[in-house]
Amino acid sequence: LSGPFSFSDFLLMAESATLVPDTDALKQKIRTDPLYGRAYLQELSRRSFSYFCKSILGYADLNAEHNAICHFLQDDPAPVKLILMPRYSFKSSVSTIGYILWRLLGNPNERWLIYSDATEKAEGFLTGIKNHLLGLSSTSKFRAVCGPWEVDPKRGVWNQGAIVVAARTQAAVEPSVDTAGLETSKVGKHYDGLIFDDLVTDKNITTKELMDKVTECYRKAQSLLKPGGTVIILGTRW
């Protein structure tokens, strides 16, 4: 295991997990063989979104409300989920950055689109995702557990507005994670999931014309969703 983290550190965090090695030999393999250790931690993460956020992404300050959001996003079968929380409540870190990374860990061939009121804000969420992938987040263990997921920008998509992860095994027109704002057109593309993070803000509720623009953006975006896809709406009450 590369970096400042050891497998014993990870195993201590996983002691209360439900996935427990069933033989002493397997436990020893996990402790001593990087291949087994990474596979074990990845499987723990796939089974529990809350474990993934806290132990792999390093979100140590998760509280009961955040854990409830994790269970809601993982277990509720509703295709459209709405989460309204105050500002500075960590909702985007969990529900946008964390959730997309968790879904890609489960299926690296998925394609996700982050919508926000401005393209620059959506790109900011993508930067948060890239920080975990590149090992730039000081508390994140994603890269140590999952390995390098970035692609060479000369050979794949890895830029300010979109990325393709190296773990992808199926070619697709859409990137792994894409970004858009109210004025952005993504006609012709199709995604497994859409996340609307702060599409409605205090700046676009002041006139009917601005509110209509938000409604139209949301309506048109539905055609980008694959059948059976997921929609998550994150916002603050204004």
Image (cartoon, rainbow, N blue to C red):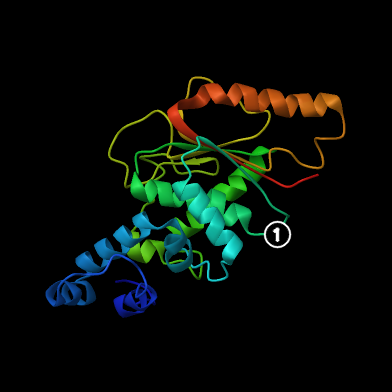
Residue 151 in the image: above or below residue 41: above
State the residue at coordinates (37%, 59%): 45
State the residue at coordinates (46%, 66%): 140
Mark 1 residue crowding within 10 angstroms, few (<14) / some (14–19) / many (20+): few
Q: Position of residue 119 (x, y in %)?
A: 64, 38
Q: Position of residue 124 (x, y in %)?
A: 61, 49
Residue found farthest to the right: 206
Horizontal side of residue 98 vs 103, given as left or right: right
Residue found farthest to the left: 25
State the residue at coordinates (44%, 51%): 101
Q: Which residue is mark 1?
A: 88
Task: Give whichever of 146, 77 is nearer the camera.
Answer: 77
**Res. 216 visible in picture:** yes
Q: Position of residue 136 (x, y in %)?
A: 49, 64
At mark 1, the secondary structure is loop
Q: Quadrant of residue 181?
A: top right
Quadrant containing the N terminus is bottom left
Horizontal side of residue 219 vs 160, given as left or right: right
Q: Quadrant of residue 20?
A: bottom left
